[in-house]
Amino acid sequence: MNTLSIAWIGLPFVVGFIIYLLPKLDRYLAFSMALASAGYAAWLFIDRSPLTLQLLDNFGVTLVIDELSGYFILTNAIVTAAVILYCWQSGKTAFFYAQAIILHGSINAAFVCADFISLYVALEVSGIAAFLLIAYPRSDRSIWVALRYLFVSNTAMLFYLVGAVLAYQTNHSFGFAALRGAPPEALALIFLGLLIKGGIFVSGLWLPLTHSESETPVSAMLSGVVVKAGVYPLVRCALTLEEVDPIVRIFGVGTALLGVSYAVFEKDTKRMLAFHTVSQLGFILAAPEVGGFYALTHGLVKSALFLIAGALPSRNFKELQQNPMSTPIWIALVMASFSISGFPMLSGFGAKVLTMKNLLPWQVIGMNVAALGTAISFAKFIFLPHKQEGQGSIKPGFWSAVILLIGGLIVANVVYYEAYTIENIAKPLAIIAIGWLAYLLIFKRTVIKLPRVLEQFDHQIGMMSLMLILLFWMVFDISIN
């Protein structure tokens, strides 16, 4: 098992190199790698034996591979496979597929790392690969968005690296457990880097522009799996150190509310989905014990929604209300919207019920408000007009990708089938009904344009400084002993 796991971690980087040597096999090699990751994740769920690898003592690499890792790895595998299917006949070059698989591999590595230095390497590699994919169209706009992403990501990682060194000075270990007893500034700096990388709270306001302006398949990967590379370590730390759990949960609630507050007023489809990614990341952090299952559900549904949004006649909701889409696309859009809203028969329902059952009392009101905001946001999609011969730009691989993702949402229902009780069903349906009424009676006619000043690049560094002050205050308040 040890040898298999190490080989699986390194295989994507080998495959990425081979794609350059055999460009005619680029799609087949990339898709095969995604299937290999799906198979490895399935094996983790079957075996259910946590694996811990200490490769180079306290100075080296520590890997923890368990069921939590399995959920994130499976998400990465399915989303990557769907993106490759979507791009199958799009004329993408070997460069695109090679970078997609390198990104896939580095994200997988981040999902098994349990020490700060190997995690740093995985996050840096993923940041470079994501930068190259965002810049792939080579337009002025895409290059600027990619550079902006790279600058923010690298700045975050500088904070993170300083914090990792400070943690090492205390316990002479780079393992996540080294946070226990570490100086407050170490935890604050490490968490600041991860919050920025994961798109959490106001540190994540770089995310809407990046995800909305990237190509459709790249947006699907960014929202589906890339941001979770920053979220996973936060979940792992919360589960490893109970003292850290309150901080993670606080940011979970704040992020869920902040993201959905923007999403309900957004009139651009891709920006609305991007803001809602911020909100849904909050749901993962709000209940770390079950964050893996929520991450799987969110990754599948958000990737599907971005792919579907790329097939709509327009990105503007007002234009979509006057320009019907084709009925098959609308059905797919409604199924994905139902799942993320928590409607039964799709895994989003089970994920939300499980998350709500694992909240602390002080979190309940805020997370229910966020769930209500989710229903309002996606009512904008559900109540759009449609007709059998509607307009839309359909890629040849569109349906195979969307069917894979939505099929995954249906199959994942079995993870928490205990959710299907009358009480559990009634509450989400009531929240969805209230959300739909609120949308039809209030928000559909409301025109509020929220300022984008905090999204501007020159304000991002300032927001990092404010977040660092907030983290210092929180860490001093909750001592790590």
Image (cartoon, grey):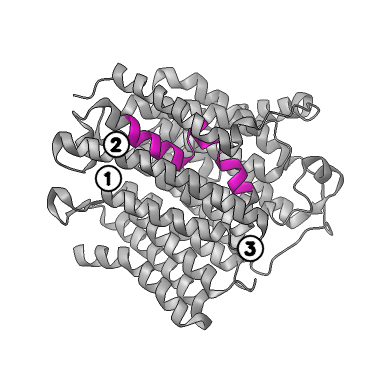
Q: Above or below — where is 44 with respect to 86?
A: above
Q: Main secondary structure of the magenta part?
A: helix
Instruction: Tell me, yes or no, whether the two marked residues, 2 and 1, touch with CB atoms within 8 Å.
Output: yes
The spot of residue 85 in percent (x, y) is 57, 68
> Which residue type does callout 2 highlight?
Gly
Q: Quadrant of residue 92?
A: bottom right
> Which mark lies nearer to you, 2 or 1?
2
Determine which residue is flagged by label 3: 137
Q: Above or below — where is 213 with respect to 15?
A: above
Q: Quadrant of the C terminus?
A: top left
- N-terminal of the two: label 3 or label 2? 3
The spot of residue 7 in percent (x, y) is 27, 68
Q: Which residues are magenta?
A: 188-212
The spot of residue 294 in percent (x, y) is 45, 41
Does residue 392 appear to the left or right of 355 in the view shown?
right
SS for dot 1: helix
Q: Quadrant of residue 267?
A: top right
> Which residue type does callout 1 highlight?
Phe
C-alpha separation, residue under disc 3 versus residue under disc 2: 36 Å
Mark 1 Cα-neighbour bin, 10 Å: few <14, some 14–19, many ≥20 = many
Determine which residue is flagged by label 1: 116
